[in-house]
Image (cartoon, helix red, strand yellow):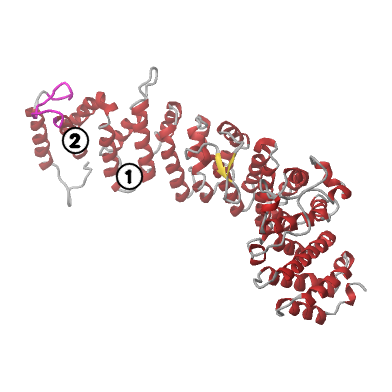
Amino acid sequence: MSGDGIDRGMLIQAEKMITKADDPTKGLEMVEDIMNLVSSGDLEAGDDGALFFVGETIPRAVYSLLNRTDFDDELENRVFRFLEMVLVFIARTIETGSDHLAMILHEILCEHSQPFYNQSTTRGGCEDISDLGEMNNEIFDDPNLTQEAVFAELPHVDFAMRGPGYCFVSMINVYGRNGGFRAMRDEIMSQKMPPSMSRVRLLLLPLFEVKEYLSVEFVQWFMRIRETVCKQVLSLSDEAFKNDFKSAQEVVQLLTGLQRCTLQDGGEAVDRFRLDFALKGFRSPFLERRLTGLGEMTEFVELFTDGGDEMARDEDKSSIVQVWVTPEFMQEWLMQNEILESIFVHNVHSEVIKRCHGVLLFLSSQQGIGEREAEMIWGASLGKHESVQKIVHELLCEMTRSQSIEVLGVLMRLMEPLKPSEYTLQHLELLRALAIHLAERGGVEGFKRQFAGLELLWKLVQDDVRFSVPELHTICLKYFFETLEFPECIDVRGTYFGHCVRNLRSHRSVPPSLIVMSRLLQATSAKRKRCEFDESLFEGVSDQHELLDLAIADLVHLQTVPFDGPIATPRG
């Protein structure tokens, strides 16, 4: 009798005998008899009884048995033999592509925290020992030798001392010795009908979750699938990549974890594949995929920008693993694949720019931002929406602390042609950062722009400057005298004091000039025991009296200037 002779009522009855009865023996026998009847052909042909059997009866029976806590030794051994038969059945029929079978396999092999395993005293009938001597990968290709191969073991534990865990490991060996893993590997590597990403995920998941028990030789043999799977993932069409992304992403994680268990390639294959996958997502036409790809690249660079020591958490978050990627490789990879061009030139999007912070800071810290890159990033703000401009200027502002003098000079050159009406708060913050860092590091021989940022700030606080937002004038003045108070600017304080004096004499830009002069006088007096006038620091006046005369003269002048309404600041 084949699967088409299976009555659904009989299947429901068998299931109830297993899940409801105190003694499930009769139900187990019925299910075992049916497993002997159902063939791969029945499942491939879509036989209704066979499909119900693997989709409903077996899963419910297995779940119920693994969760029971009332077995005596005899019944426990009986259940163990039943689960072994289920594994033999799955090994024989997994080639049909049934997802239900893969899920049942996962339940039996991976749910070893269930009561059946925790409370079991059964050792099982498939010992994790072999007469084959030292194993090699070829053993797993030979069906005859596979009968004795060790697929899994509990390392460094004496056989006589083994308890419940041995029962679980025995299950893995039963499945492997009956050709189950070979069938799974063959399906994944099939060129005729490659499995879907979701199917590959289902097949890899059980192996991944028991990877710490698997023998290195077996994992090395099984992971010959790596090249095939990598190629399949990376060759997905844009539409397939969008629809199957979650499965593809998990396949990458599963494959990565298993590859590390082979103890081969020193992690190079793993890291290169992860980066290729990130790049594929980043180049996708779909924003969500682009952001995810960028996020995966950021995970790599943050190993170095966050003070990491080239260590990373494994995919299951339980262990620390060494990564192969180095800062030098990562920088070259980002440049070679034109990541900055993709962010700031091609298909510019505010969300992508907003999340490139980690990559940009990494390149910045590695001196990977040159004059060309600085101009490229600046260019991304030109003619773009205000939201894009804001993000770009904030990024540039943060970058300045680690840039070379040459790059700072380029950014300064790009800012100088801006009209005051084009300035935003982010422009002023960037200018302040440039002014400070140029002053701090610009005192090198041959560099003539150490105070270029300070000079531009000074020009912007004058009366003839009109910002689009009046408050920016106050902010600009604040940034100017804050920068002027840096120790590196001590030699030019007298120069700007002289500029302020000339403003007072010509009755121009008086309010900001008085504020700057006051701050400079306070800064000087704070370092002296008595308030003394140090004429060597200030240009344009000989003593305090002349300075006071200038201020009074300007007040007199102000009385002669006609005006309508309240006095504005700055005044014209």
Residue extent of the magenta highlight: 525-541
Residue at screen point 66% across, 39% down: 272
In the picture, which quadrant includes the N terminus? bottom right
Number of the label disc, if any, that sits on residue 251? none
The answer to whether 13 is drawn above or below residue 344 in the figure is below
Which residue shows up at 78% across the image and 78% down it?
Answer: 14
Instruction: Confirm whether the magenta stretch covers residue 526.
Output: yes
Question: Can I make out residue 380 in this image?
Answer: no
Q: Which residue is mark 2?
A: 519
User: Amino acid under label 2?
Assistant: Arg
Query: Mark 2: which secondary structure?
Result: helix
Dot 1 corresponds to which residue? 467
Farthest residue, direction left: 545
Q: Is residue 416 left or right of residue 274?
A: left
Q: Is residue 228 found left or right of 451 in the rendered image?
A: right
Q: Is residue 45 magenta?
A: no
Q: Position of residue 400 (x, y in %)?
A: 42, 35
- Residue shown at the point (71%, 55%) measured from the top left: 169
**Magenta residues, dominant SS class:** loop
